[in-house]
């Protein structure tokens, strides 16, 4: 069951051998493969849910919801493959009569890059793990996948991993298109990252692990490869004056629910709350303190996550200028999180980057700003984020437009009057953002465009028409949208 | 005139200060800025051409052509800005009645990333330098630019750099949107790469310099940034049997012209010629040997390029299994290249990666393959390339389909019956390719999509309609193509 160097090399070699055939499969064939994975996951029924509950401590309803999201994600990529325009076909037909020189016929499209290594994440045993978004998008693009199972849910990984392999066989995909590895030595994982058959990496997890992968992949390989590591975000929330005045209590309830949801084990957990000093802000703070004080401690994913939660919370709480507004008793012996609310001033926040450290669990830090200028300075000092949220009335938003501009320069997704937890799987989603939120701000790991991470453009010049791939043929047999002479259209080309 | 650390820091700070205002300029404003740069470059007239001739040794006609290409490139990006769809607007409207949970309104588009550092290249004093493709695409995307001038044409850089600054002023762009630096210390250049205001880098040049930039940018900064380094390619050309039989002499003339064009100082110079043993191949080899023997030595760009040409050619020629078919006398004292044709066997080529080293100048290496299998094995051993070329009749191409597949897995652009020199500036061009051709196979440095290198996606969730940028408004005021619920259309959205 454990994989050592021989298993690692075999998986990488098999993935590489599967690549030429798999990359040439028709979009419809890959769509059916993805749908079959989804169907077979559902057929695992209660056995899968029970196993995941046992391994992660997550409640049944959450896991049933996450399973639906995972199957829906596979379906989204199947739909994208069938629609077909995602390959970004671009065609500049020949201009034989152009002066002083004729133009050749030049066409390009996105093509898969080769075997992708995916690291399963602890906090989403389905949606960011074995058959999660990284796997679904890499397979959709036409790349074989190797999953490095997360040690927190090896049984869940095995159930889902076998289902993917079964679905591959059932739908006639080449052997080696998918495999999963259980690796317990860091040195072996490093060896896998260094394997030259691997052409890209998807990861969701801690900053430390993500950066280790990033450095190995960019400096310790013969050929550096893209790393999409989603690592660390504290998801600032700015609450503006008029909305605070109108509904401080409602906002406190909304924020408390988001902070404590799923024991706070979300990348998009709101870890920073920016307030400008006022009676309303004080009212909000008091209300939120009460709610967090009364929040029930809940089971965390595993010992490591729980241990890190208490440790990173303590490291934050003991920084200069931090006060504790609410904190339940330490329940780490029961693997339970104690929700917490801390407070600091903008002045302290600006001068100490440690106050931006992610505390992965149900904890948040109020940053108390004297005024608008201090608020803006505090926001300017922020590192890169997955999300930035602004709560405000229409008048607030008009009056504080520069807040939106500032947050937009720091984050991948800006929310208006909502909470950042709950990441919709859709075409327009960006689950990504400037460093250190991710190692590649150009990408999203959730939503349709996650597929764009695992492709590269390939250009064909004066390619005979019978050798052109369907997406680039004059007749447009796939009926996709293409850019022809700079204009996006689904028209055919008259030769 | 020389820039030290103070000038470097000032340029970076000014670029960063210019970013908020510049990133918010309207597409039309940036289009006019780019066009004005082009007009002002033309107004420099003969003074610019004479200066570039003096500094690079390139002939007048070539420089006049390159200037037209550069101005045309600025116009291409102006056109792309006016058309507007390049921002990839994606909209998933709210679904308030969805069960079990409503969907928020989610929209995204590409936004600029911040100041871009561009390294001027020696071999294209206009098209890949101060106002070249990197600068044009970064400015088009909405990013300030800092050019590190190439020491081979400092006067040309200054003329063009001042024109860009003048055009910026004339069109009301913010101060600091463009600056150029003349840096002679490597340590200072490293400091510039490490400057945290810099958000991405464009480079065209040697493997060694490119990798040095890549490593500094990914490991020695607080925040790693994207590096688009176009570095090293030997541009394999495969010539198939039937076409050799039909026109060995014509092909030899075509290849000889491409190898010696511009003293061979092109990234896409055909440095490897793959032949399968036959009488026709021998005929081609003899013809090409004659043509290269009789080719005139021509002036090279500068001492360094000339010195490197002779040295790398010698390093290649002295490898085991290399024979010299044609080589003119050493004319390095006159800064002239001596065209050369070398030969090796596929067996030697496969086992010695040094035979794939780029020789930047008019030199090419014939790889003589016993048969089809040896040809395929030799191609499989290739590193990443900018281009791969196949010469063949329709029957050749049908019979050797796997050659095309193999080349496609190695290169960014595949040419059929053409020569790789001459890179068209158009929407479908890919001037890029797998490592070590570039440090980022996902990108192109020539053509419309070069703009995609300097942006990231930004998502807005439940953004009030009056705060949405024009590209994301329901009414589609820019009349651009957008992806709405997964379908690409220019329709408005009815709220």
Image (cartoon, coloured by chain):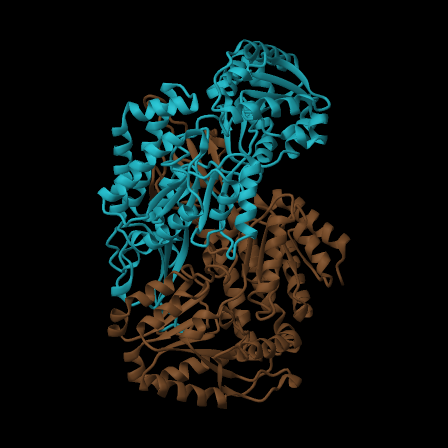
Chain colours: A brown, B cyan
Viewer-proximal residue among B233 and A183: B233
Which residue appears at 32% of the width and 85% of the height? A280
Left or right: residue B292 compared with residue A54 = left
Which residue appears at 30% of the width and 45% of the height? B81
User: What is the quadrant of residue B210 in the picture?
Assistant: top right
Q: In the rendered image, is residue B378 in sight?
A: yes
Which residue appears at 24% of the width and 42% of the height? B32
User: What is the quadrant of residue B399 in the picture?
Assistant: top right
What is the x, y in percent for residue B462?
Answer: 34, 68
Viewer-proximal residue among A180 and B285: B285
Judge whether A136 appears above or below B31 on screen: below
What is the x, y in percent for residue A366?
Answer: 43, 79
User: What is the quadrant of residue B365 in the picture?
Assistant: top right
Task: Quarter of the image for the C terminus of chain B: give it.
Answer: bottom left
Left or right: residue B174 compared with residue B235 = left
Q: In the rendered image, is residue B495 in sight?
A: no
């Amino acid at each position: 069951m454990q994989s050592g160097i021989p298993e690692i090399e075999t998986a990488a070699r098999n993935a590489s051998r599967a690549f030429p055939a798999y990359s040439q499969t028709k979009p419809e064939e890959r769509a059916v493969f993805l749908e079959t994975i989804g169907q077979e996951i559902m057929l695992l029924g209660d056995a899968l849910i029970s196993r995941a509950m046992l391994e992660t401590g997550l409640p049944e309803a959450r896991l049933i919801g996450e399973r639906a999201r995972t199957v829906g994600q596979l379906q989204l990529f199947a739909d994208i493959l069938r629609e077909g325009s995602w390959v970004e076909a671009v065609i500049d037909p020949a201009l034989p009569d152009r002066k002083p020189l004729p133009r050749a016929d030049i066409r390009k499209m996105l093509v898969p890059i080769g075997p992708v290594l995916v690291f399963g994440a602890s906090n989403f045993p389905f949606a960011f793990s074995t058959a999660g978004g990284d796997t679904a998008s890499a397979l959709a693009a036409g790349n074989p996948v190797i999953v490095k199972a997360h040690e927190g849910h090896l049984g869940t990984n095995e159930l889902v991993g076998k289902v993917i392999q079964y679905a591959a066989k059932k739908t006639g995909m080449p052997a080696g298109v998918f495999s999963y590895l259980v690796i317990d030595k860091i040195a072996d994982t490093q060896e896998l990252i260094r394997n030259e058959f691997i052409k890209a990496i998807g990861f969701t997890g801690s900053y430390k692990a993500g950066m280790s992968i990033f450095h190995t992949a960019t400096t310790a390989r013969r050929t550096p490869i893209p790393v999409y590591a989603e690592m660390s975000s504290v998801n600032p929330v700015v609450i503006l004056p008029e909305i605070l005045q109108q509904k401080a209590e409602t906002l406190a309830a909304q924020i408390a629910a988001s902070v404590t949801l799923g024991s706070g084990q979300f990348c998009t957990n709101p870890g920073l709350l920016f307030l400008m000093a006022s009676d309303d802000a004080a009212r909000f703070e008091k209300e939120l303190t009460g709610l967090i004080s009364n929040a029930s401690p809940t089971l965390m994913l595993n010992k490591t996550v729980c241990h890190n939660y208490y440790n990173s919370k303590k490291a934050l709480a003991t920084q200069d200028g931090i006060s504790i507004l609410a904190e339940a008793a330490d329940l780490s012996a029961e693997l339970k999180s104690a929700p917490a609310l801390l407070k600091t001033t903008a002045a302290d926040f600006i001068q100490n980057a440690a106050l931006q450290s992610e505390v992965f669990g149900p904890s948040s830090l109020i940053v108390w700003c004297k005024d608008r200028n201090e608020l803006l300075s505090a926001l300017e000092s922020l590192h890169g984020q997955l999300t930035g949220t602004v709560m405000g009335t229409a008048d607030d938003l008009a009056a504080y437009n520069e807040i939106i501009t500032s947050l937009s320069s720091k984050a991948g997704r800006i929310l208006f009057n909502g909470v950042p937890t709950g990441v919709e799987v859709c075409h327009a989603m960006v689950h990504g953002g400037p460093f250190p939120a991710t190692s590649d701000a150009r990408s999203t790991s959730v939503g349709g465009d996650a597929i764009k991470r695992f492709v590269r453009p390939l250009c064909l010049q004066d390619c005979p028409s019978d050798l052109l791939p369907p997406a680039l043929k004059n007749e447009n047999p796939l009926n996709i949208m293409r850019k022809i002479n700079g204009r996006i259209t689904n028209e055919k080309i008259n030769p």
